[in-house]
Amino acid sequence: MLESISLKERVTLGFALFMLFVLLGLEHLVTGVGKSVQFVLCLVAYLPISFVTIKQAFITLFKRLRLNEQFLMMIATFGAFALGDYPEALAVMIFYQIGEIFERYAAGKAHSEIKALVKLKPSVVRVITEDGSEQLLKPRKVKIGTRIRVLPGETVAMDGTLLNESAAIDTSALTGESAPVLYKKGEEVQSGCINTSNMIELLVSRDFKDSSIVRLLNLIEDATANKSRPEALISRFAVWYTPIVVLVAVILASVPLFSAQAEFHDWFTRALVFLIVSCPCALILSVPLSFFGGLGAMSKIGVVVKGSIHLENMAKLRMLSFDKTGTITRGVFVVSEINAKNGKERELLETVYALEKHSTHPLARGIVTYAQKQEVTLREVTDLEEKSGLGVQALLEGIPVAAGRFEFIRETVDSTDTVHQVQSSDTTIYVAKDGQFLGSVSLYDEPKAEALMMFSSLDKLGIKTCLITGDKFAAAKKVADELKISEVMAEQLPENKLANFAKLKQSYNIVGFVGDGINDAPVLAASDVGFAMGQFGSAAAVEASDVVVMNDDLSKIPAALRLARKTYLLALENLWLSVGVKLLILLLGALGIANIWLAIFGDVGVLVLAVLNAMRSLRFVKKRDYQDLRVLSEQS
């Protein structure tokens, strides 16, 4: 903490403390020392330590036409001088400065996580030229498809595909995972990670402005603009609070003017006590610091929250709904069954392969992978048209072909033909050619390894869960039963997802949604808390979300929710601590029971206690916790 105090501050503060003890000694131990001597001694120490505070008070008053906490401290100490209470006047300013130092130190600790991330933002990239030499370029000048080199211990500057056979990469800055991750050739390495193996080469896959580290830093910058309701309330409250405090203090000091029995010295002291205790530093600092510390704790486990308002909503969350494919399942579909009409399996595979070849949908990738393994001939299609949520149709050598959901294909085939619906819990794609039903291909997508643990943890937190998917009901029900999901909404078209999600919001006060695809973006935006998978999720989903899980690890969601609850509770503790103690001392001061020393405790003492309490949020996540997220997710 001492390193946050400059040499000048140490000297002035030390001298002021020495003079305070001298004044107290003169007042209580030595007799016959005149008030004028005490005044001079106090002034010698008071001016250096109070200069910045008084300057800021006048700047705010005359340039911004506002009264702030510095103004409260200034007039409180001026009043103490007027009463001849010189030790009290100096003590108020000394302890106010100590509180300021404490505030600066706490804010610096809270920002340390952000500073560490900013340092990861690269300034140069090692680009490999055509002749094999190395050239240093600024990241924004490097284009997609460029080969770059990363030396051992260096930060990966650009997102890129690994060209080496394997590499050990430290991803802790982005994901919170302490152990290095082993990447294999062809896998994408994210920028912001650190190369812990030998020299590696990457093929740049994203522009710098879209890279992982830049997206993360942009998310964190956005977070500071979104304040929670307690923070926003305090910001508004601070604007009109100080003028009201000054007005009440003036009224208290004016009581002797209207009552002959009232003693001026007594009521003026009460007014000073009121001014000192009313300083809102503890309230203004401790609540935002609690939330900021919580945001920093989230970043340690690889979860970025775009503002404390979302952290507050996370703390109050009672229902969390999920997309299925790629979110709670691996998103890697494997062909489980082929049902070809009249045994024309080859024709069925050729048709569906040609239709799905150019699609990026996980189902399409599963079919393409299977067809390539079976060495199915690829035939080109024309006039390809995708029907959102239904299927795809095109012309194959001039013949109309289609693949998609049962309802879509049933409308495509001739009325003389029949589409045989498969009774399976797997996802099924139906195929038609020239108005005739060819058959169907069923695919299975298994849940992620951590999905069961996540839903179990959410249940322990008292959060209901719902699966919202475009998949057929049997496939959705199978996954829901396996993972113990509370509710299921299956066979949802993109527009239906949003409508049914609105019904969930009517039943539950605050509802969240977890998704990763472009089609999830509207629901993510409509939810009270939208969680996006940040590693493989679409840019639209990340943009529309409120919370980003950087490495798509589902176990981090209950861990983040628990951190949100602890942070919100901490902020409320500080709110009631600050308000409660101050109101009590204000009441005692108005009754003439509290003196200036008790007022100093009510100001600086409460500030220190509140800040120390708020700083607990910085240690919510310890190294042993985020090495094993199951510990953090299942804590009670």
Image (cartoon, helix red, strand yellow):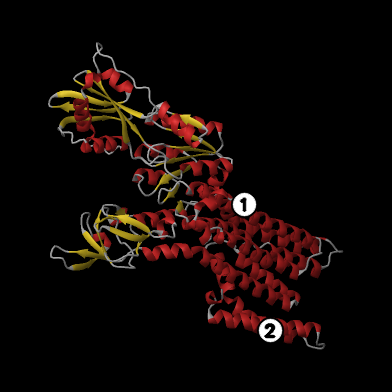
Q: Which of the 4 image quarters holds residue 55?
A: bottom right
Which is more toward the observer, 82 or 560? 560
Which is more toward the observer, 223 or 201? 201
- Give the vertical position of 515 relative to 305 (above or below): above
Res. 320 in view: yes
Residue at the spot of label 2: 19
Q: Amino acid at mark 1?
A: Leu
SS at circle 1: helix
Residue at (44% x, 34% y) in the render: 479
Q: Position of residue 396 (x, y in %)?
A: 15, 27
Decide if residue 577 is on the left or right side of residue 320.
right
**Labelled disc at residue 542:** none
- Give the vertical position of 146 relative to 108 (above or below): above
Q: Amino acid at mark 2?
A: Met
SS at circle 2: helix
* Mark in the foreground, 2 or 1: 1
Which is more toward the observer, 18 or 348? 348
Residue sticking out furthest to the top: 416
Residue at the spot of label 1: 569
Q: Position of residue 564 (x, y in %)?
A: 55, 50
